[in-house]
Amino acid sequence: MSDSVILDQVEGFLDEILESESTYFKVKFKVKPTNNYKIFIDGDQGITIDQCIKFNRALYKKIEEAGLYPDGDFSLEVSSPGVDEPLQNIRQYKKNTGRKVEITLLDERKLEGILKEVQDETVTIEETKGKGKKAVTEVTLLPFKDIKTTIVQIQF
């Protein structure tokens, strides 16, 4: 069986598992040449370590039962995306509505503000420029196609 067929099969197993848990979704799925699978999962209300462990065990079991690696020559890492990881899909954007984000556009301009709204092809960000009485609020509608990265800004 070719590597790409195995990869597709493993990703299919993951999709099956996630379908039964509709509040969770795949953010990123990659594999290194050493058969080390790195899978990032998130949830509409976040994801716990225990939930990551549950997904890891369920996927590991499916891979073993399918006999994809008869010698057990693979490893599996399931985790949530880190707080410094850019948002990857529309569900992550929707989950973070109301939070402060930094958006880097394809032309390298940066916008920082509150993620106000997420549509199928656009996001709306509210930026405050200036301070005190001179502060001005601007609302900008951005097409996803113009966005290079969006990172949630952690506030303490």
Image: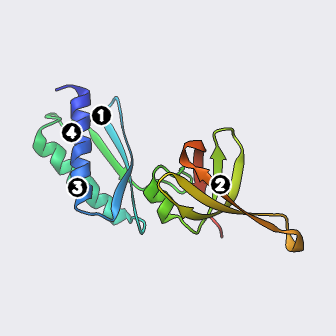
Mark 1 or mark 3, earlier in chain = 3
Q: Are marks 2 and 1 in contact (CB under 8 Å)?
A: no
Whether residue 1 is visible, yes or no, is yes
Mark drawn on residue 17: 3
Could you tell me residue 147's position as x and y percent? Answer: 59, 45
Which residue is rendered at x = 33% and y = 38% of the image? Answer: 36
Mark 1 or mark 4, earlier in chain = 4
Q: Are marks 1 and 3 in contact (CB under 8 Å)?
A: no
As measured in the structure, the alpha-carbon distance from the residue carrying label 4 to the one carrying label 3 is 12 Å
Q: Secondary structure at mark 3?
A: helix
Decide if residue 36 is on the left or right side of residue 65.
Answer: right
Q: Secondary structure at mark 1?
A: loop
Residue type, label 2: Glu
Q: Are marks 1 and 4 in contact (CB under 8 Å)?
A: no
As measured in the structure, the alpha-carbon distance from the residue carrying label 1 to the one carrying label 4 is 13 Å
Residue type, label 4: Gln
Give the position of the C terminus as an image quadrant.
bottom right
Could you tell me residue 6's position as x and y percent? Answer: 21, 33
